Image (spheres, rainbow, N blue to C red):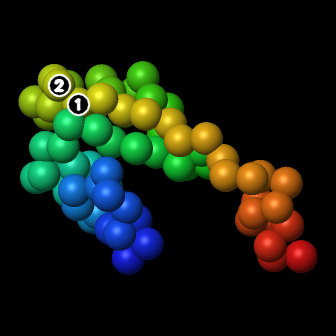
Amino acid sequence: QQALSALPMVNQVVLGSLGRDYLKVVVDLAPQVLALGYDQWPDEAKLKAECVARGLVNLNIVRLNPFEPDRYHSSILEA
C-alpha cells in the first residue's frame, strides 16, 4: 500500500475487504477506476454489471498486466 501511494499518478490507495460484501469499499468510495491485479479472480464483465447495478455507472475496470512474471510470479517466489 505504501509503495503504491508513493506513485505520482496515484491519488489514494485503499485495501479491499475479504468480508461478505467485497464491493462495499468500492461503492463507498465511488472511484473512477478500479484496477484488478492480473491474477485476481473477478471477471471484469460480471464485476462491471454488479457495479452498475449498485449505481457506479462511470466506473472503468482495468486488468493490470503482470510485472516481470518470469521473475516475480508467486509460484517462483514461494519455491
- Type of the residue with mark 2: Asn
Rendered-image quadrant of the N terminus: bottom left
User: Label 2 crowding class (10 Å Cα cut-off): few <14, some 14-19, many 20+?
Assistant: few
For image coordinates 32% across by 68% down, the residue present is: 5
For label 1, the SS is loop
- Type of the residue with mark 1: Leu
User: Label 1 crowding class (10 Å Cα cut-off): few <14, some 14-19, many 20+?
Assistant: some
For label 2, the SS is loop
**Nearer the observer, 55 or 13:** 13
* Residue at the outermost front position: 8
Relative placement, left or right, of 34 versus 37 is: left
Q: How many marks?
A: 2
* Residue identifier under label 2: 58
Quarter of the view holding residue 47: top left
**Nearer the observer, 63 or 2:** 2
Quarter of the view holding residue 50: top left
Relative placement, left or right, of 59 versus 19 is: left
Relative placement, left or right, of 52 versus 68 is: left
For image coordinates 43% across by 72% down, the residue present is: 3
Q: In x, y percent, where is residue 42?
A: 48, 40
For image coordinates 42% across by 23% down, the residue present is: 45
Res. 59 mark: 1
Q: Are marks 2 and 1 in contact (CB under 8 Å)?
A: yes
Q: In this rendering, is residue 37 above or below 8?
A: above
Residue 21 shows up from this direction: no
Residue 72 shows up from this direction: yes
**Nearer the observer, 28 or 22:** 28
Q: In x, y percent, where is residue 52?
A: 20, 25
Q: In x, y percent, where is residue 79?
A: 89, 76
